[in-house]
Amino acid sequence: MNNVQAYEKLILEAAKYYESRPLELRNIQNGNDVFDFVWCKGLREEINMWTYWQGAGVDNPEVIIVGQDFGTCYDDENKAFYEECVNCRVENRENVSREYIRRIQSNKNNRTDNSLITLTEKGLGEQYSAAIPCNDRLFMTNLCLGYRTGGSISGGNITAYLKHDSAYIARLIEIKRPKAVICLGLNTYASLVSAFEDEQSVIIDIIENFWGHLDSGKNYRDINSEGISFRIYGVSHAGSNGAMNRKNNCSISEKSNLTGMNLMLEDWKEIGKYLTELCEK
């Protein structure tokens, strides 16, 4: 089985699981709301809706960015565009990526995606900018592959769902063979690392020392799996809460005057240095 076939098989398996509507994916509590996790109708060519921003048709990206979960793909404002994404032909993927970027940049309330454009471009380097349509250096996916049926597009304890789907994303990494994987947020990072690491002490250390590791630049694990080597980084979530948490949990006094966004940029620049060093070897 080649990598294209392996990717197709992975998507089919993930879709089949969600479309079977197992009980654990129903009536998930989020404050006063209740939602189900479902598969996005028509999603068959790519693993995640986020992949239509960056990653569609990319076989060997240098960097995979992993978020927590997409939210919903059925809201009135975006439903038609998401249908356009899943129905696009191969030759239209760049146009879809360009439109995805235009929609992000025209909506300043979308702090997470706009911040990711800044963090990739000014942190990793211009060649990794998420504002470049169909940037073949990048691949984006969420760790939880389900889509919320209603209520808030975020929130709730979804740790169990992240851990379940981390097995799918681990296989994705083995298929795509990136140099680095960047996880947004502690929960995403710990869940994905647990798909590769058997030692509980490793996960405990990540959970207990996440912010300290960010301050010291030790916020990564080097992984060898299925004949490939790569580095998984854990960084603060790119949204406004992530920036606030990064600021509030910084323990380095000489950086106390920096904003959360500036601290996150420094974290991403360290990843950029790692990628540069790999290219120079």
Image: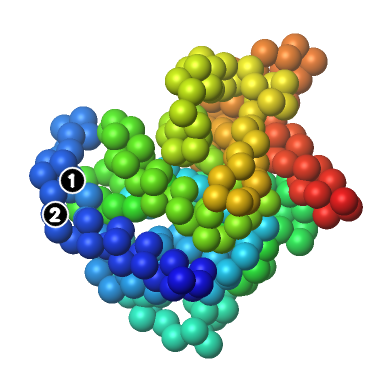
Q: Give the CA distance from mark 1 to mark 2.
A: 7 Å
Q: Quadrant of residue 58?
A: bottom right
Secondary structure state at the residue bearing disc 2: loop
Q: Position of residue 43 (x, y in %)?
A: 32, 70
For residue 25, the mark is 1
Disc 1: CA contacts within 10 A as few (<14), some (14-19) or many (>=20)? some
From the top left corner, tell me how far across and down residue 9 is, in percent.
Answer: 36, 67
Looking at the image, do the residues carrying marks 1 and 2 touch, with CB atoms under 8 Å apart? yes
Residue ID at (31%, 67%): 12
In this orientation, which residue lies closer to the viewer: 1 or 242?
1
Identified by mark 2, the residue type is Arg
**Which is nearer the eye, 239 or 92?**
92
* Three-letter amino acid code at the position of disc 1: Leu
Q: Is residue 244 above or below residue 117?
A: above
The numbered mark at residue 21 is 2
Task: Specify how the rendered protein is coloured.
Answer: rainbow
| Label 1 SS | helix
| Left or right side of 63 for 281 | right
The relative height of residue 135 versus residue 270 in the rendered view (above or below) is: below
Q: Quadrant of residue 225?
A: top right
Q: Position of residue 29 (x, y in %)?
A: 18, 34
- Please indicate whether residue 128 sits to the left or right of residue 178 in the image: right
Q: Position of residue 196 (x, y in %)?
A: 49, 38
